[in-house]
Image (tube, helix red, strand yellow):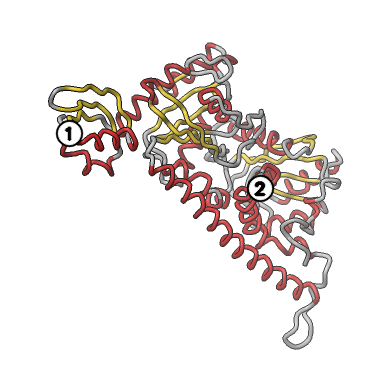
Amino acid sequence: MADFLDNSAQQKDDPLRVERAYLVGVQNPDMTAGEAEELVAELTELVENLQISVVASTIVKLRAPNPATLVGSGKVEEIIGAARLHDCDVVVFDEGLSPAQQRNWEKQSKLTVIDRQEVILDIFADRAQTREAVLQVALARMEYSLPRLTRAWTHLSRQRGKGAMGGEGETQLEQDRRIVRDRITRLKRELHEVQQHRGVQRAKRRRVPVPTAAIVGYTNAGKSSLLNAITGATVLAEDKLFATLDPTTRQLLLPGNQKLLVTDTVGFVRRLPHGLVEAFKATLEEAIVSDFLIHVLDVTAASVAEHHKTTLEVLGELDADERPRLTVFNKIDAATPEQINRAKLLIPDALFVSAVTGEGLKEFATHCTDLIRDTFGSAELLVPHERYDVVARLHQVGHVQEEETLDEGVRLIGRYPPAQHGYFAPFVVS
């Protein structure tokens, strides 16, 4: 088989054959009113990010999923008819499709049929730049594709051969499954090496223990723009979904000459494929190991409450939801008074900033300083004059807020990591 990662035999990977999309949303009984419409609107933006035109959509009210096609047979015919009427070459479901459901739809419609998960995977593949991101996306795509390999070989024979030998298609399929499994094993090994390299980099940063924060939030909330605004960095910040896939760390100088390392992370989205959460743990682990989180929300987003909920759910999957967290509503320069009031009701103690105009950034910096103080704590030390090595070490591994030379020694007020407490404890006054 040709390289499955780069040259898939599936029709959907040929951009010349996938140009017009018909979207299918699903209204489940447990959904709130209007939620399905919001999800379809989000799916429209996702699909359009792949340069595929969305020409029409529909929402199906579903009481119980049909094991064969998700929706009932009548709806199947209705959807296929509408897609053909609009000359569509791909049908996109907002709900996840099992491999069998996907095959049944494609067999009956003679069209390419994909789901939200496959769209997100394709966007991630399009955005990946560094070796780590490419490996992470490739792993997620391989694991997603493995149970769907039969879609790539429907043109081959399915007749069982004589004796123990299968038919041509069956033999080819088994070979391809073996190749994909080998590729998954190799990708996991390569990704582990990259993770180890990142661990070495993080260990080097920890030797000079500057406090760390990770910017998290829904995709397109303005996380990269905020990082650029507060640090003067030039991280890619575009008005499109998943513009940032790779973590970027920059230094922020806070009031009192306090240093803070701030890391931008990949944006979240509702119904983020679980395989991607797993595959991107190397990227998202910056949120796990940081001292606190900066949760950025787009105050102008109609579904900002759902965006907030989604981010917390993903953080929960990463066991990072208990981290100290500073919630920031961005884009107040484009917000209406009603949107500001809605956000205040949602999260009363949140901050409001504009990465474009700089409004609220001073208050943001002050709150970061307060979080560091609460996380690291502050101590007063009195160091004898003959132990200036202790003073030098506090400057090296911690943060000195005040320093005064007295007759009995050097008086210091500063912070240091908990791991250094044993060294500094003999000199702590209060």
Q: Residue at x 78, y 64 (%)?
A: 2
Q: Along the line of sight, which residue is nearer the eye, 316 or 205? A: 205
Q: Position of residue 85 (x, y in %)?
A: 86, 40
**Tag 2 residue:** 121
Q: Which mark is residue 428?
A: 1
Position above or below: 307 against 105:
above
Left or right of 212 on screen, residue 49? right
Q: Residue at x 32, y 30 (%)?
A: 399
Mark 1 Cα shell of 10 Å, populated few (<14), some (14-19), many (≥20): some
**Residue 328: image location, x then y, percent:** 47, 24
Q: Quadrant of the C terminus?
A: top left
Q: Secondary structure at mark 1?
A: loop
Dot 2 falls on a residue whose secondary structure is helix
Q: Could you tell me how far apart the alpha carbons at marks 2 and 1 are, in whole angstroms? A: 53 Å
* Location of residue 98 by image quarter: bottom right
Residue positioned most to the left: 408
How crowded pointer 2 is (Cα within 10 Å; few <14, some 14-19, many 20+) is rated as many
Q: Is residue 305 left or right of residue 131?
A: left
Which of these two is toward me, 197 or 122? 197
Residue positioned 27% across, 41% down in the render: 418
Image location (x, y in percent) of residue 194: 55, 54
Name the residue: 27% across, 42% down.
420
